[in-house]
Amino acid sequence: MTKTEQLYEGKAKKVYATEDPQVVIVSYKDDATAFNGLKKGQIAGKGAINNRVTNYLMQLLEKEGVPTHFVEELNDRETAVKKVSIVPLEVIIRNISAGSFAKRYGVEEGIVFDEPTIEFSYKNDDLGDPLINEYHVLALKLATREEIDLIKAMAFKVNDVLKKFFAGVNVDLVDFKLEFGKTAEGVIVLADEISPDTCRFWDSTTHEKLDKDRFRRDLGNVEDAYTEMLRRILG
Ligand code: UDP
């Protein structure tokens, strides 16, 4: 599997075409952004960590019956994945209050919910990824009713699998963001990444933050937190 031309460069990854029209290569960068690109920086070693963490979790999810875009890890920071068209939604699952939820509803962080919540944001940088409800998703033809229902079921299944997995490494899975894609055959699969960039991870004992909030909030020891999560996940 070799790269041909670059198709796209995003905030944290580059995407390349390959000789196989059904497969692309993602290359994870050390660049970090927050607050819709307003805060920019680098987290040394992040690309390689997010690549390995994502691939481990995608393979775990496949084993548990969740279809993903994962094909093959190529090296430290590059992975072959199925070419998909991304459904322009950020799907956010929460188990514990934090971040924008705590801010929006004026509650403290750390409230453990009886049931996980789900919400959607419309992936649109110019608009700042606004919250969107299912009726609006249908009105804007971003996904069909069947696709929304499937995406919700898959997202809750991902939460069940990951919550259990992270509990086993003494980490509370606070919240996370998923993206889904549609293959050439029209099959919805889990895409993008699952990493300390896209999840909130709190140590179950100390409640220490082991994720991108260390970068967003200038808490220090950012690289150490990412390295610690890699260590706990890959053992
Ligand atoms: N998240 C993400 N990308 C985004 C927005 C959120 O990966 O563009 C993740 C974030 O890391 C967290 C979860 O989704 O794990 C919920 O984020 P929240 O809505 O609380 O927003 P934030 O406080 O990060 O702005």
Image (cartoon, helix red, strand yellow):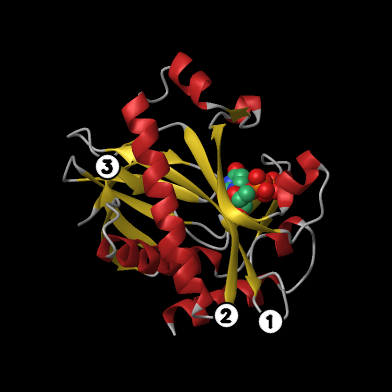
Left or right, 106 with reference to 180? right
Observer-nearest of 19 and 227: 227
- Image position, residue 162 (x, y; %): 45, 65
Observer-nearest of 98 and 191: 98
Answer whether labels 1 and 2 touch (C-beta < 8 Å).
yes
- Image position, residue 224 (x, y; %): 65, 77
> Going from the N terminus, do you reach mark 1 or mark 2 first?
2
Q: Amino acid at mark 1?
A: Thr
Residue 170 position (above or below residue 85):
below
Answer whether labels 2 and 3 touch (C-beta < 8 Å).
no
The part of the image, by quadrant, that contains residue 32 is: bottom right
Q: Amino acid at mark 3?
A: Lys
Q: Amino acid at mark 2?
A: Asn
- Image position, residue 16 (x, y; %): 33, 46
* Residue 192 in view here: no
Residue 3 position (above or below residue 73):
above
The residue that label 3 is drawn on is: 83
Answer whether labels 1 and 3 touch (C-beta < 8 Å).
no
Mark 1, Cα crowd under 10 Å, few <14 / some 14-19 / many 20+, is: few
Q: CA distance from mark 1 to mark 3?
A: 40 Å
Q: Nearer the viewer, mark 2 or mark 3?
A: 2
Which residue: 41% across, 64% down?
Answer: 161
User: How many numbered discs, if any?
Assistant: 3
The residue that label 1 is drawn on is: 205
Mark 3, Cα crowd under 10 Å, few <14 / some 14-19 / many 20+, is: many
The residue that label 2 is drawn on is: 170
> Going from the N terminus, do you reach mark 1 or mark 3 first?
3
